[in-house]
Image (cartoon, rainbow, N blue to C red):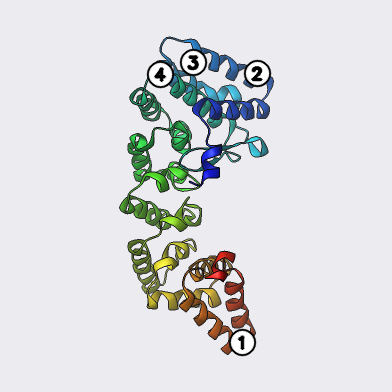
Amino acid sequence: MTPDGESKMQSSPSLAESLAEAVITATDANGGRWLSEAIGRVDTCLDPTADLPILSARARRAVGQSTLDAHGPVLHTSDGPIRTEAWDVGAAARVVLALKVVARAADVRQSVGAIQTLYRSGDESEKVAVVRALSAFGSGDALKPIALDAGRTNSLVLFAALALNNPFPAAHYTEHEFNQLVLKAVFVEVPAQHVFGLEDRTNPSLSRMCEDYVDERTAARRGFPPGLWLALAPHAGERAVDVLFKAVVDGDPDHRELASAAMARRCATDMTLRRAIQHRADAAVDEHVRTAYINVLSAVPAPSLSR
């Protein structure tokens, strides 16, 4: 993380406070009163770890299922930001209570045990809440078994909670684990372009596996999700770059958009590719083709202009 990111990083009590305030604002008076009482119980009971699954199971019914929307804060963690505007108030309340238990834990082992118990005992919606908030609990790699379990699930909802806009995998997964996460997102058609940290974690192995997948799907005359281009492009070989060029010009709107974005990102560091696109744009007779290439060049991130 950058120094600015570090200065914004919040403690468990701070995260719980900002999220609790959002829940109370987004729910009705009864829901707000229930959450305040539940927090008080966690703060004062003898064994908050034992009480947490009970309170979590009641949370959604008590505070409702409306969405936090603009009330949802960004939770600043050591792994990266967690956006909560799409969370429902029940899930947010569950995370508040879990954060309160983590804050009371005597050590990391105790806090990890509390989160693992909550995950194992919860229904799908409770598991989703835990997985979305893994980075907020501040236990690092100790919670990776939960993430890996969510990555193996057949539930698209639970898998999406791990894969999309979640900073935990990018911060804690090995290259192989991260690659498998991205590939599963592609296979099950969860939008891989929203995998947190994809741009920074791309690697030659991931690009090669994506190339193979494109070859397989193309040979079978079957499509694939456009988010794949962002994983393929950074280390694409010459043959895959040609396929990328074709997508930029001839793909449907979603494929054109993401293939163009992927190519533009690569152009930030690959001047050879950038010159090749400029040459194609200059040589193009068809205005549609020329415009497609110019759009890529126009989208190249500004810092690359000085390289």
Residue 189 visible in the snapshot: no
Q: Which residue is mark 4?
A: 49
Q: Which mark is residue 30?
A: 2
Amino acid, disc 1: Asp
Query: Where is residue 194 shown, x and y percent of the image?
Result: 51, 53
**152 vs 179, nearest the viewer:** 179
The alpha-carbon separation of the residues under discs 1 and 2 comes to 64 Å
Corner quadrant of residue 150? top left
Question: Residue 68 vs residue 106: left or right?
Answer: right
Kind of element beneath mark 4: helix
The alpha-carbon separation of the residues under discs 3 and 4 comes to 9 Å
Q: Dot 2: within a 10 Å radius of its alpha carbon, few (fewer than 14), some, or many (20 or more) residues?
A: few
The alpha-carbon separation of the residues under discs 2 and 3 comes to 18 Å
The alpha-carbon separation of the residues under discs 1 and 3 comes to 67 Å
The alpha-carbon separation of the residues under discs 4 and 1 comes to 66 Å
For marks 2 and 4, the one nearer the N-term is: 2
Q: Residue at x 40, y 72 (%)?
A: 218
Q: Which residue is mark 1?
A: 286
Q: Which mark is residue 42?
A: 3
Q: Nearer the viewer, mark 1 or mark 2?
A: 1
Amino acid, disc 2: Asn
For marks 1 and 2, the one nearer the N-term is: 2
Amino acid, disc 4: Thr
